[in-house]
C-alpha cells in the first residue's frame, strides 16, 4: 500500500508542499487545526506584509492556479495577511482538495507523530514502518498512516512571554486581560478604545515592535493622552530601526523609518536594559512592571508584548529530532539564522539535506525550521518544500538543485508588519548606517509619567 505524505498545517508553506506533491502526482493529506486555510494568517490579517505578491506565491502553486483560471493579483502590490489568505491561500486549498490523490482536512489537530507500532526507544526496523499520525477531530480521535511527515505548523500559536527568563514573569498570567501578544489592529474601533488615552508599555525589538510604535503614534494624534513606554532588554536601540537603503524589502525599510520618527515623539519614552521580572497591580488598578535591576515602569494601563514566537514540539516526542540547542531550529541552519551573530541576508537557499531529521521521512519546514529565530521569508519556505517533496519523490537531482536567488534582504529582526500600501511612510532600510539621527534615549529608574 502506498501511504500518503501527511503535511501538518494549511498555511502558506504547508499548502506549497501540497502543491508540489500534487505536481508530482504524490498522494498527500493536509491536516489543519483551524477551520479553514491560513487560519493562523487570519489572526494577523490586518498586518500588511513586507513582501510583494510576486514573492508570496509558490511557483508550482501558481501553475496549478493559473491552469484553473485563477485571478492573479497585481504582483507589485503588498497584501495584508487577510488578502493573502482570501486571494491565494484559500483558493489554493480549495483546488488541492479536488486533486484525486489529495485531501485537505480542517479541524484536524495533530496530537502525536510516531512510527507505527514502535515507540521512540525501538531501533529495529524503524525506517521500514510507516508513520502513525494521531489527531483529534470533532468526531473524536483518529490515527493515520503516512509514508512521510512534513511539519509546517509554524510558530504563531506560541508567543514568547514578557519575562526575560523565557517564562511568564510573576503576575503575568494573572494580568492576562491587560496583555496582548501581537500587533493590535489599531483601525478597529474597539481596539482603539482599549488603548486611546492610555499608558501602554511595549516590550520587544524588531519589526513587530516598530509596527506597534507606529500604530500607537497615529492613535496619539487623535488621542493626545496616549503615551508609550518602550521596553528594551538591550542597552540601546541599536539597529532596531535599521538604516540606509540596503533593504530590498522596501516596505520594511519604510516601517523602520516611520518607527524611528514615532519613537522620537514626546509620547514615547525609551527604557533600556529593562528585563521584566514581575507585573503587579497598583492601588488604582493600573500595573507596575519591575525589571531585574530594580527599574520600574508604573501607572501602566496596557502591555503589548512583541518578543517573537517559539515552535511546538510536544506532538513530536516519539520521533527522533536533531535540533539546535539554542534556537530549536534545524541544526544545520542555526549558524546562518541566529539573530545575535548572523550577517544580514546571508541565509543561503537550502533544502532536504539541511531539513532532514534523524527520523527518516520527517522534515520540519517553514517558520518551524527556524525555531525561535526571526526573519523567515515565504520564498525560503517555497524553496524548502520544493526540495523536500522532490527528495520524497526520489528525484534527488532536482532536490539538490538551488532554484532560488534571494534578494539582499538585510533581515535582522522580526516579521512583516506595516500598513502603508502607498509607501507614504518615508524611506529607510534594515542593516546599514542610519539615514537620520537616532531619537534621544532616556534610561530611567522609574517611568511613570
Image (cartoon, rainbow, N blue to C red):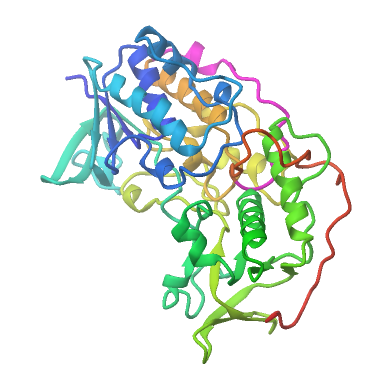
Is residue 215 positioned above or below 365 on the image?
A: below
Q: What x and y, as percent, mark residue 51? A: 60, 31
Query: Magenta stretch: dominant SS?
Result: loop
Is residue 182 positioned above or below 77 on the image?
A: below
Q: Nearer the viewer, residue 318 or 103?
A: 103
Q: Is residue 172 left or right of residue 294?
A: left
203 part of magenta stretch? no
Is residue 35 in view from this perspective? yes
| Residue extent of the magenta highlight | 394-414
Q: Nearer the viewer, residue 360 or 90?
A: 90
Is residue 130 in view from this perspective? no
Quadrant where the image shows the N terminus: top left
Q: What x and y, as percent, mark residue 296? A: 66, 82
Tell me which residue sits at (55%, 53%) in the image: 325
Quadrant where the image shows the C terminus: bottom right
Q: Looking at the image, which residue sits at the far front?
A: 222
Name which quarter of the figure residue 125 lies in: top left
Q: Is residue 70 left or right of residue 326?
A: left
Q: What x and y, as percent, mark residue 248? A: 72, 30
401 part of magenta stretch? yes
Name which quarter of the figure residue 77 lies in: top right
Tell me which residue sits at (41%, 33%) in the image: 85
Q: What x and y, as percent, mark residue 262? A: 73, 56
Name which quarter of the figure residue 348 lies in: top right
Amino acid at each position: 500500500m502506498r501511504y500518503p505524505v501527511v503535511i501538518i498545517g494549511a498555511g502558506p508553506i504547508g499548502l506549497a508542499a501540497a502543491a508540489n506533491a500534487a505536481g508530482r502526482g504524490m498522494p498527500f493529506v493536509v491536516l489543519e487545526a483551524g477551520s479553514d486555510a491560513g487560519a493562523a494568517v487570519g489572526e494577523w490579517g490586518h498586518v500588511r506584509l513586507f513582501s510583494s505578491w510576486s514573492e508570496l506565491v509558490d511557483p508550482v502553486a501558481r501553475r496549478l492556479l493559473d491552469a484553473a483560471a485563477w485571478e492573479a493579483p497585481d504582483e507589485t502590490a503588498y497584501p495584508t495577511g487577510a488578502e493573502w489568505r482570501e486571494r491565494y491561500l484559500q483558493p489554493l486549498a480549495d483546488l488541492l482538495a479536488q486533486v484525486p490523490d489529495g485531501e485537505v482536512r480542517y479541524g484536524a489537530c495533530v496530537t502525536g507523530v510516531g512510527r507505527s507500532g514502535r515507540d521512540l526507544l525501538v531501533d529495529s526496523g524503524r525506517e521500514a514502518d510507516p508513520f502513525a499520525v494521531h489527531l483529534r477531530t470533532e468526531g473524536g480521535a483518529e490515527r493515520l498512516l503516512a509514508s512521510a511527515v512534513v511539519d509546517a505548523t509554524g510558530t504563531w500559536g506560541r508567543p514568547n512571554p514578557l519575562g526575560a527568563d523565557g517564562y511568564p514573569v510573576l503576575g503575568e498570567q494573572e494580568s492576562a486581560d491587560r496583555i496582548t501578544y501581537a500587533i493590535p489592529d489599531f483601525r478597529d474601533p474597539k481596539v482603539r478604545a482599549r488603548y486611546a488615552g492610555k499608558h501602554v508599555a511595549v516590550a520587544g525589538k524588531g519589526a513587530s515592535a516598530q509596527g506597534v510604535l507606529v500604530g500607537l503614534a497615529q492613535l496619539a494624534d487623535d488621542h493626545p493622552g496616549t503615551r508609550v513606554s518602550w521596553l528594551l532588554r538591550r542597552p540601546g536601540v541599536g539597529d532596531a530601526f535599521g538604516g540606509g537603503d540596503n533593504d530590498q524589502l522596501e516596505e520594511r525599510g519604510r516601517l523602520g523609518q516611520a518607527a524611528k520618527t514615532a519613537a522620537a515623539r514626546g509620547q514615547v519614552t525609551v527604557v533600556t536594559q529593562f528585563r521584566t521580572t514581575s507585573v503587579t497591580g497598583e492601588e488604582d488598578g493600573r500595573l507596575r512592571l519591575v525589571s531585574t535591576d530594580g527599574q520600574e515602569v508604573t501607572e501602566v494601563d496596557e502591555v503589548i508584548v512583541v518578543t517573537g514566537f517559539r515552535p511546538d514540539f510536544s506532538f513530536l516526542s516519539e520521533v527522533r529530532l536533531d535540533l539546535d540547542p539554542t534556537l530549536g531550529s534545524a541544526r544545520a541552519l542555526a549558524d546562518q539564522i541566529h539573530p545575535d551573530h548572523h550577517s544580514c541576508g546571508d541565509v543561503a537557499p537550502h533544502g532536504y539535506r539541511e531539513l532532514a531529521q534523524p527520523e527518516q521521512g520527517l522534515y520540519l519546514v517553514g517558520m518551524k525550521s527556524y525555531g525561535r529565530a526571526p526573519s523567515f521569508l515565504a520564498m525560503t519556505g517555497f524553496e524548502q518544500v520544493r526540495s523536500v517533496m522532490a527528495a520524497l519523490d526520489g528525484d534527488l537531482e532536482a532536490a539538490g538543485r538551488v532554484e532560488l536567488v534571494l534578494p539582499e534582504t538585510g533581515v535582522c529582526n522580526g516579521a512583516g508588519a506595516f500598513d502603508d500600501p502607498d509607501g507614504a511612510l518615508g524611506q529607510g532600510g534594515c542593516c546599514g548606517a542610519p539615514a537620520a539621527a537616532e531619537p534621544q534615549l532616556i534610561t530611567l529608574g522609574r517611568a511613570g509619567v
